[in-house]
Image (cartoon, rainbow, N blue to C red):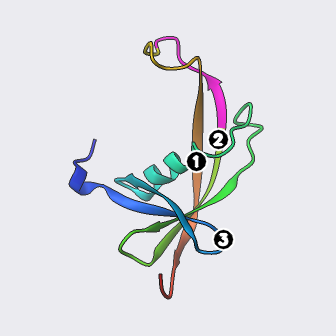
Amino acid sequence: MAPDNDKRNFALRTNDGEETSVFSGGTPRQAALKAARRLDPADSEADADPEEIRLREKGTEKVHVYEGWAWEEDAPDDKPDWMPGEITKGNVSKEGVEHLDEI
């Protein structure tokens, strides 16, 4: 795991430019995967509908655009006791990077 000083913060943006949540990660993809797990999960990965995820890197004018989806599946057999029997998983696909004129 990267040290805390290598973490970057990414603000989740709505279509109207409002920033609703902040996710941290060493890379934009790591933050996007965290955001994807908050989407409404489907019953399986094949049934999941991709949704656009827009993350602005804090301190910059770069917006990383992803398609993300989430689904539920059974937890692994060797799961810890505290983990529920069904877990939410997510995946993302990078669509590109946009640059804002102003924040």
Instruction: Give the crowd class for mark 1: few <14, some 14-19, many >=20 residues within 10 Å.
Output: many
Q: Position of residue 8 (x, y in %)?
A: 34, 59
Which callout, 2 or 3, points at the residue further toward the start of the chain? Answer: 3
Looking at the image, is 43 positioned above or below residue 68?
A: above
Q: Residue at x 44, y 78 (%)?
A: 61
Looking at the image, is 43 positioned above or below residue 75?
A: below
| Quarter of the image where one finds residue 9 | bottom left
Q: Amino acid at mark 1?
A: Ala
Q: Residue at x 51, y 53 (%)?
A: 32
Magenta span of residues: 71-78
Q: Regarding mark 3 in the picture, which secondary structure is present there?
A: loop
Horizontal arrangement in the rendering, residue 7 relative to residue 16 (left or right):
left
Residue wearing tag 3? 15
Residue wearing tag 1? 36
Give the numbered dot on residue 70: 2
Instruction: Give the crowd class for mark 2: few <14, some 14-19, many >=20 residues within 10 Å.
Output: many
Q: Regarding mark 1 in the picture, which secondary structure is present there?
A: helix
Horizontal arrangement in the rendering, residue 69 relative to residue 46 (left or right):
left
* Frontmost residue, 43 versus 92: 43
* Frontmost residue, 75 versus 18: 18
Which callout, 2 or 1, points at the residue further toward the start of the chain? Answer: 1
Horizontal arrangement in the rendering, residue 5 relative to residue 15 (left or right):
left
Q: Residue at x 69, y 36 (%)?
A: 45
Kindly report which numbered mark, 3 or 1, lies closer to the viewer in this rendering: 3
Disc 2/disc 1 C-alpha distance (Å): 6 Å
Q: Regarding mark 2 in the picture, which secondary structure is present there?
A: strand
Which residue occupies the extreme bottom position in the image?
101
Q: Position of residue 91 (x, y in %)?
A: 58, 44
